[in-house]
């Protein structure tokens, strides 16, 4: 599902992602979910002379001479949005979809910035990088042909996806140039300069800054179902038995017992003492028996969803030092990546398009 691309022209500064894109993506996601159930019936009843709709892609951003299309943004955002909806167990609001679109557009722009600047990083000459890139693309093509059986099969598969080899190769070119840029500007630099950054002093400072990761009491997060009424204890015990047998959410359990109240992502320290003691004993997956509250009216059942045992990790412990080194290395990688992105920003010009108008990025 792709929106129609309007003519581009200069205009005033505005938000990078219009609300219409958020609504359109929400519609596309809903349509995609319904398409599987209706496609077969529609195919049987479609007439040969029925008018065909032609959807034209649009540009949401440019980085130098490279364009980021709405279809690319939608494909990227659709995956993250579906994951978020599955994790939260609900549909995202338009405002949440809009935020995700903004985040994914910024991430795509940053990847294109790095790809455009790859030939200016490191010690490899631009010609050498181009030579390696062509070899990688040819290897990718041959791998696709081998997997699918023939060039014709590859062409048909790309056509099924709405792409040509040229558009696919351009996508692969950006991805591989981005990977080259990160390798040259981040990981090669880390390999050569790690001793300058991962010093004993930095490791000690990292441990002190993140001490709560290594020294902490037991922690737990639970899902919970509460029952009230004359049959509260009986229903709660039945729910506990059901929950031990089935991998249900608290909402699934509550649906089997009308009138019960489900809660999710409850921290153990906020629970009444008996429930907190059960949760903090762990392990993850444990389901309590029916546990009455002090009010004499409410009976609860909890399931430990996440559990972290108590820890007293000293800096001198080898396992702690290994973990501290990994955290410090990730911090250095993030710093190098930010510096590389700043350098890439000096070498690229970015424009964002909203409702057909070209605006500068925020």
Image: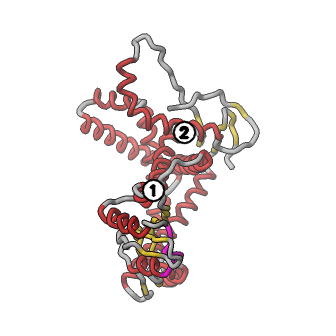
Q: Residue 213: x percent and y percent?
A: 47, 78
Q: Can residue 247 be seen by looking at this rendering?
A: yes
Is 272 one of the magenta-colored residues? yes
User: Please, which residue is most extreme toward the front here?
Assistant: 230
In terms of depth relative to the viewer, which is nearer, 92 or 232? Answer: 232
Judge the density around disc 1: few (<14), some (14-19), many (≥20) Cα neighbours within 10 Å: few
The colour scheme of the drawn protein is: secondary structure
Q: Residue 230: x percent and y percent?
A: 45, 67
Is 118 one of the magenta-colored residues? no
Element assignment for label 2: helix
Residue in view at x 25 percent, y 39 percent: 147
Viewed as shown, does residue 213 lie left or right of 132?
A: right
Residue in view at x 32 percent, y 60 percent: 246
Q: Which mark is residue 25?
A: 2
Q: Residue 212: x percent and y percent?
A: 51, 80
Judge the density around disc 2: few (<14), some (14-19), many (≥20) Cα neighbours within 10 Å: many
Q: Which residues are magenta?
A: 266-273
Label 1: which residue?
258
């Amino acid at each position: 599902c792709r929106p129609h691309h309007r003519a581009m022209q200069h205009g005033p500064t505005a938000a990078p992602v219009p609300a219409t894109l958020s609504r359109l993506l929400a519609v596309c996601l809903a349509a995609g979910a319904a398409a599987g159930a209706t496609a077969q019936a529609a195919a049987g009843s479609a007439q040969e002379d029925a008018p065909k709709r032609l959807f034209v892609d649009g540009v949401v951003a440019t980085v130098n001479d490279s364009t980021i299309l709405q279809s690319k943004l939608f494909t990227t955002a659709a995956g993250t949005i579906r994951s978020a909806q599955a994790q939260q167990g609900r549909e995202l609001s338009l405002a949440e979809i809009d935020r995700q679109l903004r985040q994914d557009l910024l991430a795509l722009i940053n990847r294109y910035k790095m790809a455009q600047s790859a030939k200016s990083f490191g010690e490899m000459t631009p010609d050498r990088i181009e030579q390696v890139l062509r070899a990688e693309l040819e290897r990718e093509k041959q791998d696709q042909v081998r997997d699918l059986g023939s060039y014709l099969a590859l062409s048909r598969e790309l056509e099924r996806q709405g792409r040509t080899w040229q558009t696919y190769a351009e996508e692969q070119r950006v991805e591989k140039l981005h990977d080259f840029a990160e390798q040259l500007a981040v990981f090669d630099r880390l390999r050569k300069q790690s001793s300058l950054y991962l010093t004993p002093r930095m490791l000690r400072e990292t441990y002190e800054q993140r001490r709560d990761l290594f020294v902490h009491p037991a922690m737990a997060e639970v899902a919970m179902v509460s029952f009230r009424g004359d049959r509260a204890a009986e229903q709660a015990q039945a729910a506990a038995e059901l929950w031990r047998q089935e991998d249900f959410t608290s909402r699934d359990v509550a649906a089997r017992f009308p009138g019960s109240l489900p809660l999710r992502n409850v921290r153990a320290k906020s629970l009444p003492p008996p429930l907190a003691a059960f949760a903090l004993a762990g392990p993850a997956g444990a389901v309590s028996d029916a546990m009455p509250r002090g009010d004499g009216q409410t009976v609860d059942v909890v399931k430990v969803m996440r559990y972290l045992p108590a820890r007293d990790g000293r800096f001198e412990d080898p396992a702690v030092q290994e973990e501290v080194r990994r955290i410090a290395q990730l911090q250095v990688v993030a710093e190098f990546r930010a510096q590389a992105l700043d350098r890439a920003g000096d070498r690229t010009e970015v424009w964002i398009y909203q409702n057909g108008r070209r605006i500068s990025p925020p």
